Image (cartoon, rainbow, N blue to C red):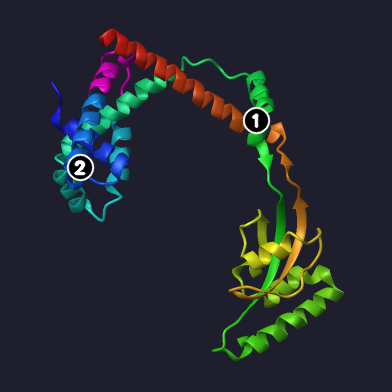
């Protein structure tokens, strides 16, 4: 016998995942699809909860309450939260019970996943060497800039005045390029001035097109001329260049291990669920 609150909870989650709407906002055919999927999910979860692996799996009350508080915190207040539950056929206690049930199912699946084969260093290295296309790094340039904005409503920032100011800065830097950070701190009208004009590491296409084009034509340590963008006038410094190429395995080893572990857990869980379904059939 199905539990109405649990099915309502599953319908709500399914409707949100599929259509980003609540069940009552769906068209009849969409509601029917959501109901079928929720019913199948309920039956599957019942098998999971009845499996031997479910023994001794308990979700601490504090964990349930923390999850409940996080969900309720997405609403302006408790009344809005309860009204939304009511609109979706759920009581507060029914929602808590369905939430706890879901968390127990998740805990059982995590327990099953511990049976997955461990990922060795050799597994990681083989994946890295057989999938080189996944570990290509684009060219990255560390950039700084100085910005003088254009604002005809401010005397010092009219186009003519702003251009004169940026040209004066450019002349000083042409003589003493090492003063870039000092000049940025004194004169740049960008918040990055506090970090000496540091824009950080940029890939192609991340900056304004006018800056991007110039930056990727500069040599390391080279200054640009005056550049105009939608923000105003800039001077750009290409501080360093990290060329495109393969990321070393040491840089990606942990990420590859996590990926392989996740895949093996999913395979293990899928095989276990398949066995459950065959037993039920």
Q: Residue at x 78, y 62 (%)?
A: 218
Residue 51 falls within the magenta-colored stretch: yes
CA gap between label 1 and label 2 equals: 43 Å
Q: Nearer the viewer, residue 46 or 195?
A: 46
**Residue 273 appears at what percent x and percent y?**
35, 16
Q: Residue at x 21, y 29 (%)?
A: 36
The residues colored magenta run: 43-59
**Residue 234 appears at what percent x and percent y?**
68, 73
Q: Nearer the viewer, residue 51 or 238?
A: 238
Residue 96 visible in the picture: no
- The answer to which quarter of the image holds residue 11 is top left
Mark carried by residue 173 = none
Residue at image mark 1? 253
In the image as oriented, which residue stretches furthest toward the front?
Answer: 29
Q: Is residue 280 above or below residue 263?
A: above
Q: Nearer the viewer, residue 60 or 152?
A: 152
**Residue 227 appears at what percent x and percent y?**
70, 73
**Residue 87 appears at what percent x and percent y?**
15, 46
Please rate how many residues cluster around mark 2, counting C-alpha atoms within 10 Å: few if below 14, some from 14 to 19, many from 20: many
């Amino acid at each position: 016998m199905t539990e109405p609150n649990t099915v309502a909870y599953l319908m709500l989650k399914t409707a949100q995942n599929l259509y980003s709407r609540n069940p009552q906002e769906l068209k009849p055919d969409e509601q029917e699809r959501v109901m079928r999927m929720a019913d199948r999910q309920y039956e599957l979860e019942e098998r999971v909860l009845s499996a031997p692996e479910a023994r001794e799996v308990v979700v601490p009350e504090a964990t349930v309450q923390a999850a409940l508080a996080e969900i309720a915190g997405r609403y302006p207040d408790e009344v809005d939260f309860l009204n939304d539950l009511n609109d979706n056929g759920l009581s507060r206690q029914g929602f808590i019970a369905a939430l706890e049930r879901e968390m127990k199912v998740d805990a059982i699946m995590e327990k099953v996943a511990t049976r997955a084969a461990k990922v060795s260093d050799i597994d990681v290295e083989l994946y890295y060497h057989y999938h080189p296309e996944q570990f290509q790094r684009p060219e990255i340039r560390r950039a700084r800039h100085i910005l003088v904005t254009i604002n005809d409503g401010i005397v010092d920032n009219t186009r003519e005045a702003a251009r004169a100011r940026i040209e004066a800065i450019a002349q000083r830097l042409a003589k003493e390029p090492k003063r870039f950070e000092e000049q940025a701190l004194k004169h740049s009208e960008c918040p990055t001035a506090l970090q000496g004009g540091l824009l950080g590491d940029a890939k192609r296409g991340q900056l304004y097109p006018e800056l991007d084009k110039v930056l990727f034509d500069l040599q390391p340590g080279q200054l640009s001329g005056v550049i105009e963008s939608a923000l105003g006038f800039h001077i750009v410094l290409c501080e360093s260049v990290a060329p495109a190429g393969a990321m070393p395995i040491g840089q990606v080893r942990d990420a590859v291990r996590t990926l392989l572990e996740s895949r093996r857990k999913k395979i293990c869980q899928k095989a276990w669920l398949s066995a459950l379904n065959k037993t039920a059939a």
